[in-house]
Image (cartoon, rainbow, N blue to C red):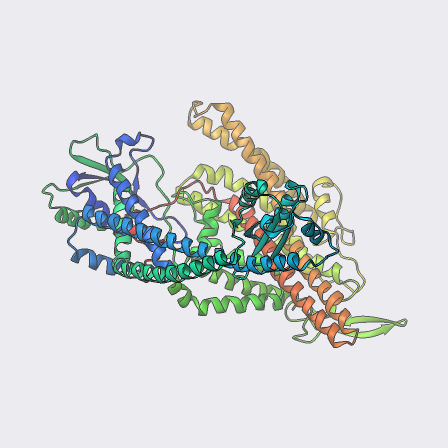
Amino acid sequence: MTKESSVFFPEEMQHVQLVVPYESAGATIRLLAEKDLIHLIDENTGNDSVNKRYTESYIHCEEAERCLNFIGNQLEQYDLLPPPISLATFNEQAQNRDISENELRQQILEADTSLHERITRTQHLEVQLQTAEHTLAALRFYRPLLQERRTAIQGGEAETDKSSAFEMELIGGLNFLFSITGIIDSTKLRRLLYTFYRISRGNVFSSSDISSFDDKKSFFTIWFPTESILRKLMNIAQSYGAEVFEFPAEDVNLDKLENELTNQIYESKSVLRQSYGDNKNFLLQLQQTYWFNRLFYIREKQIYQYIDFADFKTIEDRAIYKGWIAKRRVSEIQPLLDQAQEISGCAIHTTIEFDTVPENPPTYIETNSFTYAFQLFNDSYGVACHNEVNGGAFYCMYPFLFGIMFGDMGHSLLYLIVAITLILISPKLRDAGGETNDLILSFRWFLLFMSICAFYCGFIYNECFGLPIDFFGSSYVQGTKEGKKIWTQKPNKVYPFGVDPVWMFKDNELTFINSLKMKLAIIMGFCQMAFGMVLQFIKHFHRRDWLELCLSWLPQMLYMFSFFGYMVFIIIFKWCSHHTPGEEGVNLIQVLIGMLLSSGDKIDKGSESYLFPHQKTVQNAIALIFIITIPVLLFAKPIVEIVCHKGKAHGGVMEIFVMNLIDVIEFCLSMLSHTASYLRLWALSLAHSQLSHVLYEEIFILTLKIYNPAAFFCGWAAFAVGTVVILLGMECFSSLLHAIRLMWVEFSSKFYTGQGYEFKPLSFKEAAYKVGSK
């Protein structure tokens, strides 16, 4: 009986071999691609391209796709791109069309050639129009300057500046004063003029102004005394990317040139409008079949790509395909093969062989819009092997780890509003399509749970924008003793949930909050790693790997729970123990050190390390178990493996011991380092809290004390910007990264290898979805 799909384990896979006649190979691949059914194995990997029988057809499909991409770009530029059609519509149209692939490709190539010619002609007209407009603009910039020079020389006006003095010293008349006019990027103008000055050794002067048609362009006119440097100056200007014009000095010629340019611009605009209209009409014809052709060649390209995955040599006139299929869907394949035979009109049946192969099958874990983001985080670390526990099923813990570090009711509430908004507008985002919208849709639930967990943890910390809120009434009352204010706990009164707000903004606030969050981080880390070890047990039990279960997992659990489990126990025990006011609690670090290094010392009631009766006996037993598990881990498993293989284990005896030694050292040291690594939960939470306090006290409150509306507004604005940039931005991103690290390393390393590879079925739907079809 086939198991149903589960999120906890990859699906059971069946290796299949299809022996397909050549005539029905294309139809078989097409139908399989429509159902997302089979993961095909390329039997020609590593072979020369000469073995690929359908390479030429594949290249033809790529050629048609390039043409369609160009047509699509032009449709988009002319705002004529129609919305994508659905796959159901495409299949319906494909059944009603009676045209071969070659004929359709020829039509697309002809349309592409014609469209290229039209676009090239239009671009040429645009260049002509732009050139004429720039020339006319430069001419209109040049003529007033020319008139000014003529008036200055004829009137004999004397100027005191150097450029006018130079002008008056030029050779006696305007006929010997030469010039060029141009248009250049404004950023390059100063360098160009400086180059002119250096090349001519100071024998030029210039006029310039901002362009009338583009703020980023500038006009310039260069005046110089001799024609010998004309060509050199024009080459320099062109090297700077300038458009350069040489205009006559006579008014008659200038009037004639201006009239010609005006008429040319008018005619060019008229022709260009007509060209745009012709292009639009031509694109309207292509618009009707664009998406059908696009999906058709996506499908054909996929068919020719996968049809070459077959082994064509073993059986004559047969293509042998090998692949993987989910066991629960095995019954779906035979009807598809029969349908493919009917479509192709082939008289020979396709045969199916189900066999067992030693190689690892791909990993297939079915996801939906809710579970996709969780699974994606896990697969980024590594894809599960086909017979191990799926780590992605437990990434629901990730939002809570984030919440511990980001815990603040106010900040999380802002993200909660964003998450709810994304959920409400998700239908519109889904209809709009696009990679960005798809990414937002995938992680909207992730953001929602992170916000809820951060709000919950902020409720426990009693922090809202770094400030406490007295929800239930403090369990402390204020009094005086020896002239000093003190806080005394009310009899039989405990704050019902979270941290009592009375601790905030007190001298010992940091000491208390640090101790609480640090110990919570240790407890959370131990619980998560212990859960990881439970998952390792499930994995070994699922595989029926009794050797790993008894000689590896069991000693590891004893090693972990003996020392680290005891550490968590005494933390909770101390919290639950009653201490009289002023009494110093037991130093837990000293207890743990003494358990290993001072096992002979007595622990009596009243001693500094005393916690509970018979503590010494319990600690000696724990220390003994902790120490004994190490040699058991080192030697038990290798010895049993050697005995089972009668000394002929793969790699030799020495390799077995060395590899096991590496694993044991890694586990033993990682338990200590991973436990310490969970202190980042405390560190990030502390940083978030302290930054909130700094922004509130040093910016917001400081400006309130000035009693000035302008100062209050500036302070509030700075507080808001700091909250968004530092706390909602940087601190949120930091918490995300640290939570990912804890999930990938500290948690997943306890049970997860991530050495599998993803099940990638032959899918026309996925290929069509990438271009926007649904």
The one nearer the camera, 483 or 24, is 24
Q: Nearer the viewer, residue 292 or 163?
A: 163
Q: Residue at x 45, y 36 (%)?
A: 547
Task: Left or right? Give the position of 283 relative to 187.
Answer: left
Residue 443 x/y as whole percent: 47, 59
The residue most toward the left is: 347
The image position of residue 774, as x and y in percent, is 32, 59
Task: Kindly identify the residue that appears in the image at 70 percent across and 73 percent down.
Answer: 713
Q: Is residue 524 visible?
A: no
Identified at 79% across, 73% down, the residue is: 705
Where residue 208 appears, as percent x and y from the top left, is: 61, 56
Identify which residue, 21 or 185, lies in the foreground.
185
Q: Is residue 4 left or right of residue 585?
A: left
Report the side of 360 relative to 725 (left or right).
Answer: left
User: Seen from this angle, which residue lies furthest right?
Assistant: 482
**Left or right side of 73 for 307:** left
Q: Which image quadrant is residue 361 in?
A: top left
Does residue 548 lie above or below 425 as drawn?
above
